[in-house]
Image (cartoon, grey):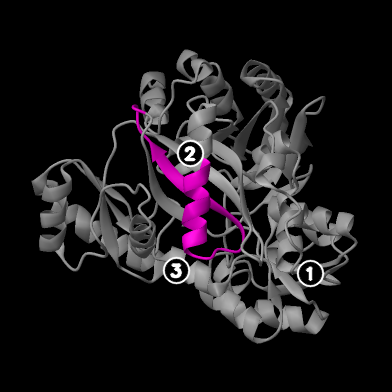
Amino acid sequence: MFKKILIANRGEIAVRVVRACKELGIKTVAIHSEADTGALHTRLADEHICVGPPEDSLSYRNIPNVLSAAEVTGVDAIHPGYGFLSENAHFAEVCESIGIKFIGPTSENIALMGDKAKAREIVAKRGLPVTPGSPGVLNNEQDALEAAKKIGFPVIIKAAAGGGGRGMRVVNKTDELERAFQAAQAEAKATFGNDGVYLERYFIEPRHIEVQILADQKGRIVHLGERDCSIQRRHQKLVEETPSPAVDDRLRREIGRVAVEAMRAIQYRNAGTVEFLLDKDQNFFFMEVNTRIQVEHPITEMVTGIDLIKEQIRIAAGLPLTLKQQDIQISGHSIECRINAEDPERFTPSPGLITRYRPPGGFGVRVDSAMESNTMVVPHYDSMIAKLIVHGRDRQEALARMRRALSEFVIEGIRTTIPLHLRILSNPDFEKGYVSTSFLERFLAQQSP
């Protein structure tokens, strides 16, 4: 087992990893930018070291600085969390080359799945269901038009190296395609340094379903059920739940089997997530693989009782999975709300000083956060400041518990999305589980005066 781990991240995920390491008896090193001096993750870790100024490109995503911090503090592994360097194949490769274990998949896994078009191709060759789309990256607008005509409108243009909703454009008809193609290419280039894009059929009101995977160094793979991440705005998730109201036992077994087969096809290692679209007829289609721990991993932990961060660390240390597929049982229902420092009507950032912070508690309630009273929410990073997670015996109890917990959550000094979450959870369609990736767009339109 590792003796000391550097956490190449900040905020709630850095706190989460510190806590897992403490329970495993592993020393921790927290990195931080100048803006995060004195932040909670630095105070909980055994050591902390500054890696640069507030801008993440000069600190948390600065590979030479992060690796220098690792060498100076003598760690034997790095946990990247999510975001920042977590899906950077070059970073993982450099860690491997200098003898520091990267707690995640191999650099080859990351590079391969980082090319979304290539990932689709590999999965399709295994005979697994993929979203109808172009065979690979498109060279120009004419190729895109020909592919769109074969697929049928509407289509969605996606960045091959993308994620987080960047480099995406929905196209409903022929005369929209050229402008959308150029805009997607430009955004992909600016965001990911790669202007490669491909096409997929755009499904009307599908669900976004993802399956959590664990795979050890010997190739043993298990899945931990699905998460429904359909409540999202501009491809950014706001509410997640497990199990999905739309997935029965038969479909869960089948989508889990396909997810495991997809990961076996690429010889995947460590924790990862296979993402699917589920249509109204219960047909599901592979979209992509996320080669990291997900923001929404706690809801899977709540219904399985399995600590995914500890499992990541054990697998990276070379330990075999002690879990067999038949050992994994889904118990009850869990929901997560992402609490963002944003205006809940206009979705504009709301940085500033949190003058009062009182998280909810009680049976079945968990809050993952690095916030406290008199903590500054700085404008340099993602706006998510807390994850509120609840667990109930069934979906009805989980909904009631989440509404209660949201109403108890006090954050003053800045604006947050708590009021929006309360409105979503009180919506009759959401209460009945009638949701899709278009739910929030319709919901917000109905809320407008």
x then y, percent, for residue 286: 39, 48
Comparing labels 1 and 3, the label whose residue is closer to the camera: 3
Q: Residue at x 35, y 57 (%)?
A: 120
> Do the numbered discs 3 and 2 sit on residues whose CB atoms are within 8 Å?
no
Q: Is residue 412 visible?
A: no
Q: Which residue is mark 1?
A: 5
Q: Residue 57 falls in which quadrant of the image? A: bottom right
Residue occupied by mark 3: 112
- From the viewer's perspective, is 197 left or right of 178? right
Residue 343 horizontal/vertical position (percent):
52, 36
The circle drawn on residue 117 is: none
- Identify which residue, 384 or 28, lies in the foreground: 28
The residue lying furthest to the top in this view is: 428
Do the numbered discs 1 and 2 sit on residues whose CB atoms are within 8 Å?
no
Q: Which residues are magenta?
A: 256-281
**Pointer 1 and pointer 3: residues touching (CB < 8 Å)?**
no
Residue located beneath label 2 in the image: 254
The answer to which of 319 and 417 lies nearer the viewer is: 319
Distance CA(mark 3)–CA(mark 2):
24 Å
Name the N-terminal-most of marks 1 and 3.
Answer: 1
* Residue 53 vertical position relative to residue 16 in the rendered view, above or below: below
Question: Three-letter amino acid code at disc 2?
Answer: Glu
Using residue 379 as the reference point, say whether residue 138 is left or right of it.
left
Is label 3 in a helix, a strand or a loop?
helix
State the image coordinates of residue 105 (x, y, percent, origin top left).
59, 66
Q: Is residue 178 magenta?
A: no
User: Residue 107 in the image: x percent, y percent?
Assistant: 55, 73
Give the CA distance from mark 1 to mark 2.
Answer: 37 Å
Q: Is residue 79 above or below residue 41?
A: below
Q: Is residue 276 magenta?
A: yes
Q: In which quadrant of the rendered image does the C terminus lie?
A: top left
Decide: few, some or many residues near mark 3? Use Cα within 10 Å; few <14, some 14-19, many ≥20. some
